[in-house]
Amino acid sequence: MALSPLYRALAELVRIPSVSGDEGAIADYVCVRLKDAGAVFERDADNNVIAFLGPDGDDPLCLCGHLDTVPAGKGWDHDPLEPRLADGVMTGLGVSDMKSGLALMLDAVTWDLEVPVVLAFITNEEEGTHEGSDGVTPFLARYRPRAAVVLEPTVVDGRLLVEAGCQGDLVARYVFEGRAAHSSRPELGDNAITKAARLMADVEHRANGLRPIPLHSGMTVDPSLAVTIVDAGIRSNIIPDRATVTVNRRVAPVENMDAVMEDLAALGPAEFPMVCPGYILPEGDAFLEEMLDVCRRTLGYAQPYCARGWGDAAEFTAAGIPAVSLGPGILRACHEPNEPCVLADLDRCKAVLQRLLGGTAR
Ligand SMILES: [Zn+2]
């Protein structure tokens, strides 16, 4: 069976390895596709590619996607770079996160767009630090679209949803100091691991007390707290004089980040190496309403949600640009072996975007 140009583009994208930091070949492919379509585009030294489509205008709508994938983990039934198709489902590394989104962005060059559109193909998103010189940051330093759709996966239980916000991502690191001693005389030392263990029990207790937080009518999000790294002890016969515990808190967008940090600092000697605020578009926000209306008219329903994890759309909104995520990948399939994507979801997402951008296929 011959694949449609959209599905074929997805298969071609999957065949190009593009682990974070190694996006040259996939940027080459994107540039060839843009050039063949006669699009105006530019590429920087870090392989970020920006393209301008549709009528001229200084308030374009941005479609954004990252070119990189995580490395293939264990457990694949086939070569992760050789996509397989069965029963309308394609599997391959990055099909959902987020080469299906990239395929749609490339497809948009063939649409008769009624509004100006800027495509942002960005790099180093998966490995990025949420701030600095990676992901969407270089693009936002130069361009100011009126709004953005990030084509990260938002298909949940077979339904294409609209991600209207995401939780913040806060990392706390606790460093406990003690005094070393021979373990045959522990009373001469001061055990740093014992202090760390107390903290971990407190963290567990705090985590169990977290409850869903209401955002919009009918929408809640679950904040979370977990110990993620413990580093302590050097030998079985030495009382440890140092222990570090890293804790990750996912912060609902309506929680006060300072208050959350104060609460964590009350548990022990905390430093905060990463503080990334989340966001939620307010109920009734004009761009959110526009997206929901487009979904309703195209899909027959519209369902916004707040992601539990952090996403690039938060950086757009932090820059004052309203943003949602909406993409054909399966949210829960990201970074999994045999990562799947339902091809019909590409068509559904394409229909939504075409209604939004006024573009029927040429
Ligand atoms: Zn992604």
Image (tube, helix red, strand yellow):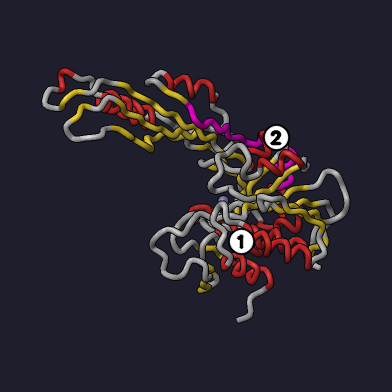
Q: Which residue position holds label 1?
A: 100
Q: Which residue position holds label 2?
A: 319
Give the x, y percent position of residue 114: 84, 55
Q: Amino acid at mark 2?
A: Ala
Give the x, y percent position of residue 227: 37, 35
The vertical placement of 186 against 14, above or below, is above
The vertical placement of 131 against 135, above or below, is above
Residue occupying the point 25% across, 20% down: 179
Residue occupying the point 62% across, 45% down: 135
Residue occupying the point 54% across, 36% down: 167
Give the quadrant of residue 192. Answer: top left
Q: Is residue 280 magenta?
A: yes
Where does the C terminus fall, quadrant-wise?
bottom right
Counting every numbered tag in the picture gives 2
Q: Secondary structure at mark 2?
A: loop
The magenta span reads 272-291
Give the quadrant of residue 219. Answer: top right
Q: Is residue 119 magenta?
A: no
Q: Nearer the viewer, residue 358 or 271?
A: 271
Residue 54 visible somewhere in the drawing? yes
User: Residue 291 shows which numbered tag?
Assistant: none
Is disc 1 surrounded by few (<14), some (14 to 19) or many (20+) residues within 10 Å?
A: many
Label 1 residue near ligand 1, CB within 8 Å: no
Q: Secondary structure at mark 1?
A: helix
Q: Amino acid at mark 1?
A: Ser
